[in-house]
């Protein structure tokens, strides 16, 4: 049984997740901040294969399996031990990304992709998922403006793909209304940060024993 708190951050590319997680992290210095795909050496290696712009021949099922493999290793090596120690884990993307990107936008089917992920995660789901909702046109514009950010294979998908990713997330919000909370990510950094902080603090307060 884990006593920690597992919170994930989701949304289309360029929604601002990484920016906001780094700001939230400053308020909770003992929290573990991590990301998918990646977060540990083996998963970072898998990340490089998945996102390599040269890998244009990658089959959608191969892609889904690689994300699930990276997820498994990251969960076992980093996330689960931290939760068992009672830590707060803030993770940039998790299984919902696979459902929205591979399941819905790539057309593999959300239920099919959920099945392979159940094998990887063995029911370990976040307590709270903060979904950064943004029009992908704005998200992609933000990425283009950021000179330091390398453009990866998924970024190169057309706008229609990214619109489908957003639609996929909206379906997930309907399917998991108790877990996924939407934030309007088109606001200023400070607006999005304040709302995120409120949600994270609310989740932690719920778990605190009252006397
Ligand atoms: N609320 C905001 N308003 C304007 N620009 C923002 C906002 N939030 C983030 N940005 C900028 O947009 C760019 C993308 O932000 P960030 O990398 O945090 O997004 P992300 O959701 O993590 O994207 P990805 O998942 O594609 O890596 C960065 O240059 C960041 O400075
Ligand atoms: C976990 C996960 C991610 N993706 C996509 C989403 C992004 O386009 C990239 C990761 O890049 P980021 O800059 O770290 O956000 O991968 C996906 O398609 N499926 C997944 O399960």
Image: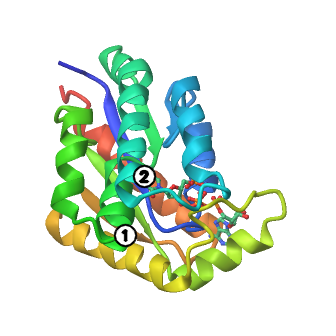
Q: Quadrant of the N terminus?
A: top left
Is 108 left or right of 27, judged from the image as shown? left
Q: Which residue is tagged 2? A: 63
The crowd level at tag 1 (other Cα within 10 Å; few <14, some 14-19, many 20+) is some
User: Can residue 130 be seen?
Assistant: no
Residue 196 % position (x, y): 46, 57
Residue 101 % position (x, y): 39, 64
Is 103 left or right of 89, judged from the image as shown? left
Q: Quadrant of the C terminus?
A: top left
Image quadrant where residue 151 sits: bottom right
Query: Marks 1 and 2, how far apart in space?
Result: 10 Å
Q: Residue furthest right?
A: 147
**Nearer to us in this view, 178 or 136:** 136
Tag 1 secondary structure? loop
Sequence-first disc among 1 and 2: 2
Picture residue at 39% right of the left edge, 50% below the top: 62
Residue 9 % position (x, y): 43, 53
Image quadrant where residue 65 sits: top left
Residue 56 % position (x, y): 58, 62
Tag 2 secondary structure? helix
Q: Which residue is tagged 1? A: 106
**Nearer to us in this view, 166 or 44:** 44
Picture residue at 42% right of the left edge, 33% below the top: 89
Instruction: Tell me if the residue at label 2 has its CB under 8 Å from ligand 2.
Output: yes
Image quadrant where residue 47 sits: top right
């Amino acid at each position: 049984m884990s006593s920690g708190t597992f919170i994930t951050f989701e949304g289309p590319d360029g929604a601002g997740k990484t920016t906001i997680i780094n700001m939230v992290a400053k308020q909770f210095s003992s929290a573990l901040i991590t990301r998918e795909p990646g977060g540990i050496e083996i998963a970072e290696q898998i990340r490089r294969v998945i996102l390599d712009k040269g890998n244009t021949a990658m089959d959608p099922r191969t892609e889904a399996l690689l994300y699930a493999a990276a997820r498994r290793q990251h969960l076992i090596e980093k996330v689960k031990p931290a939760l068992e120690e009672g830590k707060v884990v803030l993770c940039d993307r998790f299984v919902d990304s696979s459902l929205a990107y591979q399941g819905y936008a790539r057309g593999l089917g959300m239920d099919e992709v959920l099945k392979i992920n159940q094998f990887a995660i063995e029911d370990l789901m976040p307590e709270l998922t903060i979904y950064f909702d943004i029009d992908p046109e704005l998200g992609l514009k933000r990425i283009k403006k950021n000179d330091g950010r390398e453009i990866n294979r998924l970024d190169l998908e057309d706008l229609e793909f990214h619109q489908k990713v957003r639609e996929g997330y909206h379906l997930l919000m309907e399917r998991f209304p108790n877990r996924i909370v939407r934030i309007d990510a088109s606001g200023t950094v400070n607006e999005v940060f304040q709302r995120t902080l409120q949600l994270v603090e609310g989740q932690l307060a719920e778990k605190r024993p009252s006397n």
